[in-house]
Image (spheres, grey):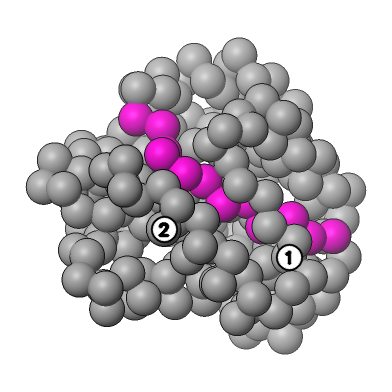
Amino acid sequence: MFITFEGGEGTGKSTLVQIISKQLEEKGYEVVLTREPGGKGSLMAENIRELVLSPEYKEVNAHTEALLYAASRAQHLDEVITPALKENKIVICDRYLDSSLAYQAYARGLGLDYVLNINRYALDKLPDLTFYIDLDPKVGLDRIKDRTKNDRLDQEKMAFHEQVRAGYLELVDKYPKRIHVIDGNKSIAEIALEMIDEINKRLWKY
């Protein structure tokens, strides 16, 4: 089973993927925990991550940014995600294709057609389940204001983050069977419980 976690900044994704992964392992499942951009286990994808998120490259072209994400994703699929799924493991990924659609297609204004086209390799490998944690960007950014290190996207203006959220909500309408929306105002414990319940409902199919 391939499960992805999506949401804006400060929604608690990184914490939740750890909690859910641990709970599934305690139930006896083999779990591969990974992330995008990058992908633990893929040196090339991780190097692209360092490049694309570095605040040093503030003037990067939107098309270049989208292409770098797509390239990292293709490598990540081949080296990490696909092999794990073939071995009947559960793959949990912090961000995936929906991030490119929300951030580049919508917020950067590149359009769905362009971003889907450059990610064609990933379209045959969509997640079985995606959790989208919905939260007002003002609340999310306030949660991360004390971080010692913010990446290039964290530093975007509020209007950008609001467009990201609007993009995600359009994706929810586009993929209602795959994307499960969660209220990001709930506590981490409440969200984790809701996630595990939804995973349990679907796991029997796999």
Q: Which mark is residue 152?
A: none
Please tell me which of labels 2 and 1 falls first in the chain: 1
Read off the residue under disc 1.
184
Residue 77 on image: x %, y %: 27, 39
Q: Circles 2 and 1: CB distance less than 8 Å?
A: no
Task: Answer with left or right where residue 193 lies relative to residue 124.
Answer: right
Front residue of 50/93: it is: 93
Residue 24 can be seen, yes or no: yes
Question: Is residue 134 highlighted in magenta?
Answer: yes
Q: Secondary structure at mark 1?
A: loop
Residue 58 can be seen, yes or no: no
Residue type pointed to by label 1: Gly
Quarter of image, res 106: top right
86 lies above or below 154: above
Residue type pointed to by label 2: Asn
Q: Which residues are magenta?
A: 125-136
176 lies above or below 40: above
Task: Answer with left or right where residue 54 lies relative to residue 157.
Answer: left
Task: Answer with left or right where residue 163 lies relative to residue 123.
Answer: right
Q: Secondary structure at mark 2?
A: helix
Read off the residue under disc 2.
200
How many circles with numbers are drawn on the protein? 2
Front residue of 150/144: it is: 144
Distance (Cα) linking label 2 and label 1: 21 Å
Front residue of 15/177: it is: 177
Q: Residue at x 41, y 23 (%)?
A: 123
Q: Residue at x 73, y 65 (%)?
A: 184
Residue 205 on image: x %, y %: 32, 41
